Structure formats: C-alpha cells, structure tokens
Amino acid sequence: MSCALDACSPPRPLPLAVWLTVPVLFTATVLGLLGAACLTLGVGDGTQPLSAPVFGAAAAVTAALHSGVPWGRRSQLRRIARWYPALVLASGIALSWLTVPDLVAIVIGGPAAAAAVALCVWEHQLSADLGA
C-alpha cells in the first residue's frame, strides 16, 4: 500500500529518535524565531504564546516524515506512532493558554534551531555517504 506522503520521505531511513524530536525542535525553533523577531522589531507585549497552529504545523511535518521511519515488524510501535502527530496537536491545543517571555523563547529556540540544522546536515551527509 502506497502512502501519498511517501514523496516527503527522507532519502534514507530516518532513525526513530530523530523522528520523535522533530515536533519538539520545530516548535521550539519557531518560538525562538518569533521571540527574536518581536524583540528586534520592538513589537508585541514581550511574550510569545504557545500557539496551536505552530503545534499543528509540527504535527503535519511529523506525519509527513512518518513513512521515512523503518518500523519493521514492530506493529505496536507502528500503531502508537500513527497517533503521535495527533498527540502533538492535542498538546498544542492544551498549552495554547501558555505564554513565554521573548528572552526565554530565544534561549529555548536558539539551541533548538542549531540542533535542527545539525540534524539536517548530519542526515544529508549520511545519505550522501550511503549513496541514497
């Protein structure tokens, strides 16, 4: 059975641990970038909301990468993984009342952005080394 999201799959199998960190890194990076932009431009009230749309985008990216993870015969893990993007979205809805000061958002988002870029570069180099 083919998935419409197969086109979004990485060129080589994506490790499960990396797939699980995608929504966390995505959300933290967006939060940090928003905080930095608001602080730099002097707009907003000095806080960033944990918004459901950002968590929704993180859930969509996680769902798109789902087919790139080698699940093998671990059917229980595969069933749990199908619900993981929904859990990310539900977390965003549950936390949408929470706000974070801009400086805290930058402190969280900066390392998250660096880690996300490092993971992308690392995965790209591994894919190139393996000839995928």
Image (spheres, rainbow, N blue to C red):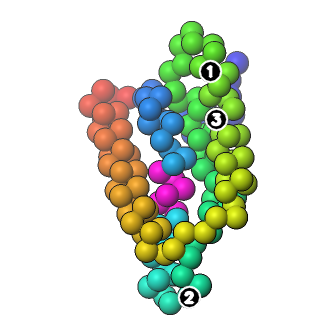
Q: Please indicate, yes or no, whether residue 8 appears anywhere in the rendered image.
A: yes
Residue bearing mark 1 = 78
- Residue 13: which quarter of the image? top left
Check disc 1 and report its element: helix, strand or loop.
helix
Q: Tag 2: residue type? A: Val
Image coordinates of residue 118 in percent, x first then y, are 32, 49
Q: Give the residues in magenta.
A: 25-30
Q: Residue at x 51, y 53 (%)?
A: 26
CA distance for labels 1 and 3: 10 Å
Seen as rendered, the residue at the extreme top is 73
Image coordinates of residue 48 in percent, x first then y, are 58, 72
Residue bearing mark 3 = 84
Foreground residue among 84 and 14: 84
- Residue 50: which quarter of the image? bottom right
Is residue 26 covered in magenta? yes
Q: Residue at x 30, y 33 (%)?
A: 126
